[in-house]
Image (cartoon, helix red, strand yellow):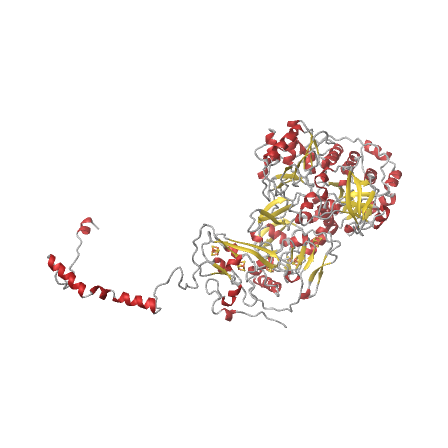
Amino acid sequence: MSLDNLKNRNVGVQNYKMLDLGHTPETGWGKFKQVLKRSVKLELFVGLKVTMREMFKALFMGEMHTVKYPFEKLPISPRYRAIHEMKRLLESGHYRCIGCGLCEKICISNCIKMDTRYDENQRKEVSDYTINFGRCIFCGYCAEVCPELAIVHGGRYETASEQRASYSNFEDMLTPMDQLVNQKEYPGFGAPTPVADKNIKKTPLAY
Amino acid sequence: MSEVKRKQTKEITVTIDGKSITTEYGKTILEVARENDIYIPTMCYLTKVEPIASCRMCVVDVEGVDGMILSCQEKAVDGAVINTNTKELEAERQNIMKLYDVNHPLECGVCDKSGECDLQNKTLEFNVSQQNFTAKDMYRPVQNWGFISYDPSLCIMCEKCVRVCNEIVGSEQLQVSTGGYKSTIINTKPENNCISCGECMAVCPVGALVSSDFKYTSNAWELNKIPSSCALCSAGCQMYYEVKPESIDNPTEKIFRVTNEYEFTSMCGAGRFGFDYANTTAFKDRAKFERAVEAFKKADTITFSSSITNEEALMLTHIAKAIDAKLSCPEAYGFSKFLKAYSSVSGKSLWGGDLATLAKSDAIISLATRVKDDAPMVKNHIAMAVKREKAQVVYMHPIEDSHIQNLVTKFVKYEAGSEEGVVALLLELLTRDKELPTELKSFIDELDIGNLSGESSISEEELDEIVATFWKKRRFSLIVGEDIYNHPEVENIAKMLAAIEKYTNYNVVVTPPASNSLGVALICDLEPEATGYTVGYNCEADFNLSSLGDGDLDMPALNQQEGSIVTINKQLVPLNVALGYDGYILNDIANELGVGRKYTIDFTSELPKDKGFKGIEFDSLANNFSKYGEDIRGYKLEVINVESKIELNDVEDLPSFDGIVVYNVDSAQNPNPFTQKSKLTKTEPKLLGSKQFAMAAKVKDGDLVEFELNGKKVRRVFSIDTSLKGTIALNPTSDMGLSAFAVSSYRFSQININKVGGANE
Ligand code: SF4
Ligand code: SF4
Ligand code: SF4
Ligand code: SF4
Ligand code: SF4
Ligand code: FES
C-alpha cells in the first residue's frame, strides 16, 4: 500500500443522525435556569435509582454479586492444577502413598524429595516427603503418574510467599484426619476414567 | 587332556539370523550370538557360572533339528543355521513370561528391584498385560538370612543364587525345594556356613533377595553409581558405591549400598556390607595441620599401614627424602622381604599365578593361610576350581577350617612355627623327578627329611598322599599365605617357594596381607623398624594421621580419595571418590614440604616404571569389564626380569610352640579396623577357642581373659567355637584401631592367659 492510499483514506458515505438534544444555553442566565431546573426535578437520583436498589438488596436482602476476596473464593475447576494434596485411604485413614518414587522420578523440575524406610510391619514407609513450590511448575505429571491416586492437585492457588523457595511437607499436604469424611476423590489429572470399573478384568482364580 | 582340547579348537562357521559368523568350536550358541551383538532373551543365564538352563527363554531354532534348542547350553557346531526370532519362538517366550507372572505380587511400587528388575523388563518386553492362568496362592513369609532377606513370593526360581553359592562361593548353602508353585529356595544352614557374602543377593534378577539394611530405603534409580575398587583387601574387587543425599533434612551424601558387575565378578561380605568407613567428620583445622607439618619436619621415621594408595606411597617416599626420614610399614615389611627374596631366586619381579589361573587349576595347595578369612576371593577361586575343574585341594595349616571342609580334599596339619620345614618338605616332594641346578639339588639332598617331618609333624605318608591326590592332575597352583611374611625365616621360605615355582609346573599365587601391600612393597624402600620420633599414617606412632578419624590429623579413607592399588592379580586398579572429604590430605602436607603435586593423582603416571608400573595417567585408567566379561580395569603390572641366583640357607631346628597358642586372624566379614568402624560388619571382638583350648587354658565360655600380645595387654571375652579343634585360639585384631596396623609379629604366639572376669560379670 502506497503512502498516498494511506493518507487518502476513503471513509465512504456515513449515515450519521443528529440527536435532538435541545440547545445548550449560551447566556449566563440561561445556564442558571438549567441548573435550577435540574436540581428541583432531582434528576441525579433518577440516575442513582438502580445503584441504590442494588445496594439495598446486597446489604439487606443478601443478594451480593461480588466475591469478598480474600475472605471468599470462587469454586475452581477440578482440573485446575494448584497446590498438591495427599489423599488418605477412606477405610483406614492411612495415607495412600506407598513410596514408589514415581512422582519423584517424573517431576521435571526435580522438586519432589522423599525418604522411605523399612517399618516395623515389614512395609515400606514414607518417613518424609516434600515438594519445593519455588520450583514446581504445576505440570501435573506427579499426579498423573501416581499409581495410588495419592498425590493430586488441590484448589489452593495462592502461591505467593516470603521466600522464593517455599516447601510443603507431608503433613501439610495430607488430608487432616478430622476432614477424612469430607475427602473428595480427585476428578482431574490421572483420575480413573468414568468407565474404569467396566474395564477391570478379574484375575482368574482356581479356588 | 590338553591334547584332546587342542584338537577340538577348530574354526567353525555358523549362521545366526542370516549373519554368517566364524568363531572357534567350544562356545555355546548364546555366547556366539552375544559376541556378535545378536540378542537372545534369557532369564536364568549368568555369565560367570556354568549354564543353569532353568528358564527356557533362550530357545532358538536350528535348521534340521526337531524342537527348540536351549542356546545357553548347546554348543554351536559347524554349518549350523540358527534362527533366534521366529513366531513360534516369540510365542514360546511369551508363554514363559506369562507363567513367570502368575501370582507374582503386584508390588513393584515398593520393591527394591523395581527399575532394574529382569522380570519387570521382560514382562514389558513380551507384552504380558494380563494373567490368564491361575495357581493357588499361599502364605510365604519373608525370611531373614543375616544381612540378606529372602521373599519367596517374589522368587522366580531361576536358581542363580543356588548356583553362585555352590560354584563361586563354595558354601553350598542354598538348595532348591521343588514342588510346582510351592518351590522355594531353602537356606540349609543359615547360622553355620553362610558367610553373608551377599553373592546370592547380587545375582538375584528380582527383588527376592535383597539387603536387609538397604531394604526400602531408596529407589534404585535415585542412587548415583560411582565405579571404584574395593579397598578392604588385596583382591581389589570391582565395585560401585551407590550414593545419594542422606535424607531430606541432611543433604550430605551417604553410601546406601554397594553393587558390582555381578555378571562377571564377585565380592565378599566385607566389601558388600562393610562400606561405611568414610571419615566424615573431618574439616580443615589449620592449627592441627601446622602441627602435623611440624611433626613431619622433625620425624625420624614415617610409619604407615599398607591400606593407602600407590600415589600416597610414592608421596611418602618423596616426603621421606625431603625430610631425611626413614619409611617403615609394619604391615608390609615382611611381605616386601618375602618378595625380594622370592625374586632373587625366581628371576622375576612378581610371582607367576593369579586368581584366574587358580580357578583353572585342578590341583591346589593352600599353604600358611586361613584362606576363607584371610582372602575370601582366593577361597572363591578355589571353589570355582573344585566345582568346575574337579580340583583336588590340599589345605596345609596348623588349624583345620571346618567351614571349607567341602572344598578340601586333604587337610595337612603342621605345627605352628614350622613353616620353613613344611616348605622344605614341599620343595623336596614337588621337585622329586625334576631337572634341578646343582646347588638346589645339593641343598635338597642335604635336607633331613625325617627330622623335618617329625618336627613339623607332617608324616612321610601324608606327603605321599599329596602325591597320590594329585595323580594325573595337570594344572597346579600353590597359594602362599600371610603366615609366612612375618616368620623369622621368611627369606629362606620365600626362596624355597620361588624354587618350586621356577622348577616345577606350579603357579604360585601370593596373597598380599593388606589391600595395597604389594603396591607399597614395590614403591617404598622399607626399614625393618621405626626408630626415634615417628609420624604415623594409619599406623600407631608419636603423631598420628588417621583415616579412622581418631588421630592427631584426619585423613580421607580409601573411599574418599582418588588413587590406585595393586591387587593380588598384579593389576593396578583405580579407586574413586564415593564421599566428599573436607579435611587436609597427604598431598597438602607434601606441598607444604615442597614435594607435592597439584593433585594426588598427578603421581599416578610417576609410579616407578622399573618396578613394572606403566606410567599411565589416572584419568586414562578404565574401571570396567568389556561386554564379553574381560577384566579391563587399570592395567597389569609388567613383570620385570631380575638377576637370579640360588642362595639357600640350611634349614635349622624349627621353632616350637608349646602350651597355649593364639593366632591373629580376623573374620572374612570384618577383616580390619575399617570394617570394624562400619555399621553392619562391626563385631564384638572375641577370643575364639575349642573346648580343648578352654580346658588347657582353664577358661570357660564367656570369661573375660587377659593376655600379652606383641608387648601389649589385650582383654577379650573368651568364647567356645564348636567348629574349632586343637589348642590354638583365634584372636581378632580389627578392633585395635591404629595399633592393629602396627602389628608386625608372627601370627602365632604363645601366651599366658589370665582370667580377669567370670562368665556372668
Ligand atoms: S506438578 Fe510437575 S513440577 Fe510440580 S511437583 Fe508435580 S511433577 Fe513436579
Ligand atoms: S507416585 Fe504416588 S504413591 Fe508413588 S511415591 Fe508419589 S505419591 Fe507416593
Ligand atoms: S521382583 Fe520385579 S516384578 Fe516383582 S515386584 Fe519386584 S520389581 Fe516388580
Ligand atoms: S550370602 Fe553367600 S554364603 Fe550365604 S547363601 Fe548367599 S551366596 Fe551363599
Ligand atoms: S532367590 Fe532370586 S536368584 Fe534365587 S532362585 Fe529366586 S529369583 Fe532366582
Ligand atoms: S538362559 Fe537358557 S535356559 Fe535360561
- Observer-nearest of B645 and B505: B645
Q: Is residue A125 above or below residue B413?
A: below
Quadrant holding the C terminus of chain A: bottom right
Q: Is residue B91 above or below residue B272?
A: below
Question: x%, y% of residue B314?
Answer: 64, 33
Q: Is residue A1 above or below residue A92?
A: above
Question: x%, y% of residue B651?
Answer: 84, 34
B151 horizontally vs A22: left or right: right
Question: x%, y% of residue B57?
Answer: 62, 59
B622 horizontally vs B144: left or right: left
Residue shown at 37% from the left, 63% from the top: A67
- Observer-nearest of B107 and B712: B712
The quarter of the displayed image where residue B71 is located: bottom right
Q: Report if residue B665 is visible in the image.
A: yes
Question: x%, y% of residue B709?
Answer: 79, 39
Q: Report if residue B41 is visible in the image.
A: no
Looking at the rendered structure, the number of numbered marks drawn on it comes to: 0
The quarter of the displayed image where residue B338 is located: top right
Residue shown at 66% from the left, 66% from the top: B139
- Observer-nearest of B294 and B488: B294
